[in-house]
Amino acid sequence: MSGDAASTPVLRADRRPRSAGRRSATLLVGGVLVGVILVTALVSFFWLPYAPSDISGARLARPSAAHWAGTDKLGRDLLTQLMIGARIALEVGAGSVLLGGVIGVALGLAAAFAQRWLDDSLSALLDVLIAFPTLLVAMLVVAASGASLGSAILAIGLAMSAVVARLTRILAKRVLSLDFITAARVSGTRWPGLVLQHVLPNIWPTVVVNLALQFGLAVLAEASLSYLGLGSPPPNASWGSILQQAQGTVLVAPIGAVAPGILLVVLVIGVNLVADGLRDIGDPTRRGRS
C-alpha cells in the first residue's frame, strides 16, 4: 500500500515533462519548416539565380550546376520560380491573415456588444458567408477586380474574415457573460475599456491560433487561384501556377510538379504545427495532459 502511494507522485511528475517536451518539439519542428520557407522568401528579395523572365536555359532541362532544380517548358530556371513562389505564398498568407483578422475581430466584437436584433442580423450574415467555400468567394472577388497579387490577398482576407468574426463573437459573448464583466460595468467601465482590458486579453490566444490555421488555408487558396489562372500574373509565378504549367510535362520533367507540391505541404504542415504548439501554450487545460 505504501509502495503504491510512493509511486503515484513519481508518475504524475513524469507526465508534465513529457507533455512539455511534446509541446516544445511541435513548436520546434513547425518553426523549422516555416523558417526554411521564410528564409527562402527573404533571400529571393536580394538574390535570385536568374531573372524571372530569363528563358535562356534549355527547355525541361534536368537539374545541373547551371540550373539546380532544372528548367520549365519555357526554359526558365525552376529554382528561381520556386523562390519567388515562396515569397508570394508568405505575402498572401500574411496579408490575408492581417486583413481577415482586423475585419473579423472588429465584426465579432461589434456583434458581441450589439443589441439583440443587430447581433442576430450579423450572425445570420456571417453564417451565410461561411456557407460559401473560401475558394469560391475568392474566385468571385478576383474575377470582379482582376487577377493580381493584391486581389488575391483581398479576396482571401475577406473570405476568412467571416470565420474569424464568428469565432470572435462566440468568445467575446462568453467573456461578457462572466461576473467580473458585470462588476466592471457597475464600476462605470465603458465598452472600449471592456474590450481592451477584459475581452481581448481573454480571447487573443484562441484567436491567434485560429489565425495561424487560417494562414495555411490562405496559402492553399492562393495556390488554387493561381492554378486556375486567377493569381499573381507572370513572370512572378506562384507555386500553384508552376503546378499548372508542369502538369502537361510531369512524365518528362516531374520535378516541376513535385517540388512546388512538396513546398506547399511543408509550409502548411509547419504552420499547423506552430498553431498546435501555440494552442497548447495558450490553453491551460492542455498543459498538464500527456
Image: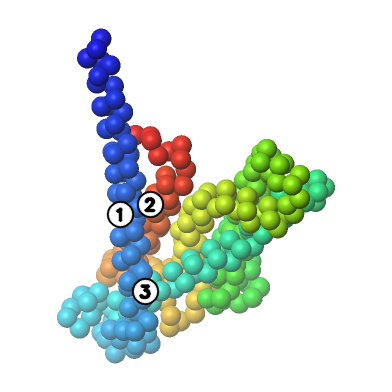
Above or below for 162 versus 245: above
Label at residue 260 = none
Instruction: Tell me the element at label 3.
Output: helix
Q: In x, y percent, where is residue 187?
A: 74, 47
- Which of disc 1 and disc 3 is earlier in sequence? 1
- Residue 213 percent location from the top left of the image: 48, 54
Is residue 279 shown above or below 138? above
Query: Do callouts 2 and 3 mark residues in contact (Cβ within 8 Å)?
Result: no
Q: Amino acid at mark 2?
A: Leu
- Residue wearing tag 1: 29
Residue 162 can be seen, yes or no: no
Please give the label number shown on residue 273: 2
The amino acid type, in three-letter code, at marker 1 is Val
Q: Are marks 2 and 1 in contact (CB under 8 Å)?
A: yes
Measure the C-alpha gap from mark 3 to mark 1: 19 Å
Residue carrying label 3? 41
Residue, x 63% and y 50% (percent of image)?
199
Q: Tag 3: residue type?
A: Ala
- Give 232 or 17, whichever is nearer the viewer: 17
Residue 42 sits in quarter: bottom left
Question: Where's residue 252, x and y in %?
Answer: 27, 70
Of residues 24 and 217, the one nearer the viewer is 24
Secondary structure under badge 1? Answer: helix
> Which quadrant of the rendered structure holds the N terminus?
top left
- Image location (x, y in percent) of residue 16: 32, 36
Q: Residue at x 18, y 78 (%)?
A: 64
State the image quarter where residue 70 is shown: bottom left
Q: In the displayed orientation, state which residue is furthest to the left.
A: 65
